[in-house]
Amino acid sequence: MSYDLHITRAGSQLRAAECPIPRAQWEAAFEGWQRAGEIEARFYWRDGQIWVYTVEEHIGEIAAFAAANLGARLLGGDDEEYLPDGTAVFTDPACRPDLIPRAKPTSSGTR
């Protein structure tokens, strides 16, 4: 069975534009992902999120990639969150915090 999923930093895929993943960042991360060409999935960047069309067996791997490489989460069409082990967590998207990238400290320790 195929799934329509979203890689986003927002608490809900409907608010992805509020915490966008820049296209250049997505492309760089995807190019560096060694498994990208081996899994059965299609990826599309649009409006600050990545749309993913995949089969169930790859959900955990894609979720792990999203978290490790983009500081993002993998959400389903009903805003369920998929974890790196492939399980789904159903929480109220309004109570789920956004994942906003933090500024990296400079060499002097200030921002």
Image (cartoon, grey):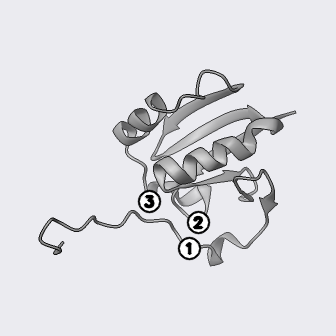
According to the picture, the residue beneath numbered tag 2 turns out to be 11
Q: Amino acid at mark 1?
A: Pro
**Extreme residue in the bottom direction:** 95
Viewer-closest of 52 and 69: 69
Which three-letter amino acid code belongs to the residue tagged 3?
Answer: Cys
Disc 2, disc 3: CB below 8 Å? no
Q: Is residue 75 above or below residue 1?
A: below
Which of the 4 image quadrants contains residue 41? top right
**What is the C-alpha distance between the residues marked 1 and 3?**
11 Å
- Which mark is first along the chain, 3 or 2? 2
Q: Residue at x 76, y 56 (%)?
A: 78
Q: Name the kind of residue labelled 2 in the image.
A: Gly
From this view, report whether residue 56 is shown above or below residue 77.
above
Write down the residue under mark 3.
19
Which of the image's four quarters has the C terminus? bottom left
Check if mark 2's residue and mark 1's residue have beta carbons within 8 Å.
Answer: yes
Q: Earlier in the sequence, mark 1 or mark 3?
A: 3
Numbered label attached to residue 73: none
- Front residue (pair 16, 58): 58
Q: Quadrant of the N terminus?
A: top right
Q: CA distance from mark 2 to mark 3?
A: 9 Å
Q: Quadrant of residue 27?
A: top left
Count of labels in the image: 3
Q: Position of residue 90 (x, y in %)?
A: 79, 66
- Left or right placement of residue 21 versus residue 24 in this view: right
Name the quadrant containing residue 52: top right
> Which residue was labeled with disc 1?
97
